[in-house]
Image (cartoon, helix red, strand yellow):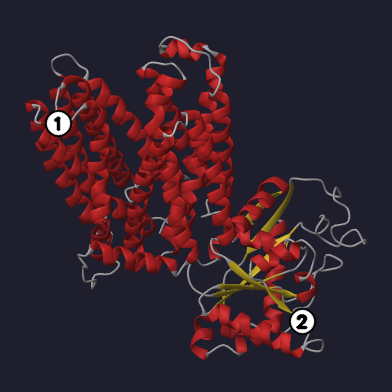
Amino acid sequence: MSHSANQFSLLSQRRFAPFFWTQFLGAGNDNLFKFAFTVLVTYHLQLAWLPPSLAGLAIGALFILPFVLFSATAGQLADKYDKARVMQLVKSLEVGIMALAAWGFMQSHVPALLACVFLMGLHSTLFGPVKYAYLPQHLGEHELTGGNGMVEMGTFVAILLGNLAGGLLIALPQVGPQAVAMSAFGLAVLGRLTAQAIPASPSTDPALRINWNPVTETWANLKLAHRQIAVFRSLLGISWMWFFGAVFLANFPAFAKEVLHGDEHVASVLLMTFSIGIGIGSLLCEKLSRRHVDIGLVPLGAIGMSVFAIDLYFASRSLPPAESLSVSAFLAEARHWRVLADLALLALFAGIYSVPMYALIQLRAKPSHRARIIAANNILNALFMIASSLLAGALLSAGCSIPELFLVLGIANAVVAGYIFFIVPEYLLRFFAFVLTHWVYRFKVRGDEHIPTRGAALLVCNHVSYVDAVLLMAASPRPIRFIMDHRIFATPVLGWFFRLVKAIPVAPRSEDPAAYAAAFAAARQVLMDGELLLIFPEGGLTRDGALKPFKPGVMKILADLPPEQRSSLQVIPCALHNLWGSFFSHASGKGAMTEPFRRGVFNEVGLSVGEPLPADAVSPELLQARVAAELERGMD
């Protein structure tokens, strides 16, 4: 699989571009159709059985209903059949739906248009799982974050453009419904044409027997996801983001009118600001993560979401009364720019929050069940969005103002995020690694493609400082278990971190034979479970900056593995460089962590990862030579 230079270069490649434009056109058409229909029944048609006050609610509910009813089936279809073929069939369905919708617009036939809302919800239900399951089949680990960022950016830009186009077209005098009809049908046809160019994406589970019961299938998929706790919590985290975002999107019109005293065009400015913010945040993820799947960005995103949701309350709670402001009059008031900045930054951090979790699900979910797990996520998203509407409605009915609603949401986000990060410490650990490698050091990594994204591997590395394990964790797309000296494991403050990452403390056999045996048994189990294990074969931190002889502990781990496990195991030499002399090393002669400003901040440090070696061919001497070679390579 070739790797793109950056996320934007994916748009020039067939494995991504047709897929991107297909989903972009579909998202845009969804929103053009729904918004135009909402405006039609709100402003142009007088229907006793569908009053304007209920039109938006009815259309939204009809669109979400298929996600609850059919997501489980959609996930199974995406796993069982070629994903390109599924997308092509779904886009053919869209052409038929939009043909019916075109007739409904031109005849002002509301029941037909309501049926099309439900069918377009079905279209999106079928497309969702295959969309996210397609990416990891065609993108490498280094491209997943960027690819997901492009998809999220494209989706929100398409939503924005679709809403704007739907509102403008339906407002055209005399020809508005016809213009919407032709545009929606034309976009559907164009989407079907781009789908035809999507490359083949073979089935991941062709023998799958479809379970048509959505309740039992959804429950089965959630149980499957729950086996990988980071995946399951990511499902909940993404659903919470939709809960959070749905409250803002649903209340933009009322917020613009009642709080900001603007006209309907000001509500469009809020939607545009939110969409652009989400898009920028989604695109930033690739740069911030250094093209890895880095869930350390999730706490950063959650912090930003809460900070700017809370500040939005303070920025908007005391705005003076005014006549209905036009966009120009609204933008002429300086205090309104704080509101827009809060909204843009809130959305930006929501993009940073969500993209890594989508990428983590794609990377770590079992490939044969990936689409079904994503389908279960879509059901959770729909349920969380329904719950957000009910809760927001209850709070507003109880006398809560819209700024107060945003304040409650910002505080609730901090509580929910804190709970998730407490029960899944990997998020906070990755955040700690993110801070260390972005704001304390300038961390450069070479050869990280040698760290496998799946399967067991044993990493061996020189030991220079107390943060070596953190730096290696930052370079890996997967969690790493560490075997380390029991004295370092017991270090104040850092010992808390080592316990969180489930490091394995090892004591010398002469000091504690039982602990020694237990440590090596635990290390072997890590490899037998298909995880990554790291060992520092020098047996302790260097006291002079030089590479010390490797001890035979690594050979003991390998010797006691079952032969079939050992024959397939990769041993990967790694070398950290330029850490000697840092605050966390022993360079001063006074001990580590005794002179905080010895080297300042933003020093460049690095990791060089060598080519894997077969476990049956290694020895302590060979591994030491390979690590030494990587040290020299890293210094070049």
Hey, what amino acid is under mark 2?
Ala
- Left or right: residue 139 compared with residue 301: left
Residue 541 position in % (x across, y down): 80, 69
Numbered tag placed on residue 49 in the rendering = 1
Image point 19% across, 46% down: which residue? 91
- Left or right: residue 342 compared with residue 273: right
- Left or right: residue 627 compared with residue 162: right
Hey, what amino acid is under mark 1?
Trp
- Residue 5 appears in the figure: no
The crowd level at tag 1 (other Cα within 10 Å; few <14, some 14-19, many 20+) is few
Residue at the extreme right: 590
The crowd level at tag 2 (other Cα within 10 Å; few <14, some 14-19, many 20+) is some
Image point 69% across, 67% down: which residue? 498
- Asked where in the image residue 83 lies, by quadrant, the reply is bottom left
Residue at the extreme front: 398
SS at badge 1: loop
Please state which of the two labelled residues, at mark 2 or mark 1, is closer to the viewer.
1
Circle nearer the N terminus (2, 1):
1
SS at badge 2: loop
**Which of the two residues, 225 or 597, is positioned nearer the viewer here?**
225
**Which of the two residues, 328 or 438, is positioned nearer the viewer here?**
328
Residue 395 position in % (x across, y down): 44, 37
CA gap, disc 2 to disc 1?
77 Å
Image point 33% across, 49% down: which residue? 382
Q: Are marks 2 and 1 in contact (CB under 8 Å)?
A: no
State the residue position of label 2.
507
For the C terminus, give its image quadrant: bottom right
Looking at the picture, does residue 178 appear above or below residue 404?
above
For the N terminus, give its image quadrant: bottom left
- Residue 11 appears in the figure: yes
Residue 588 position in % (x across, y down): 90, 58
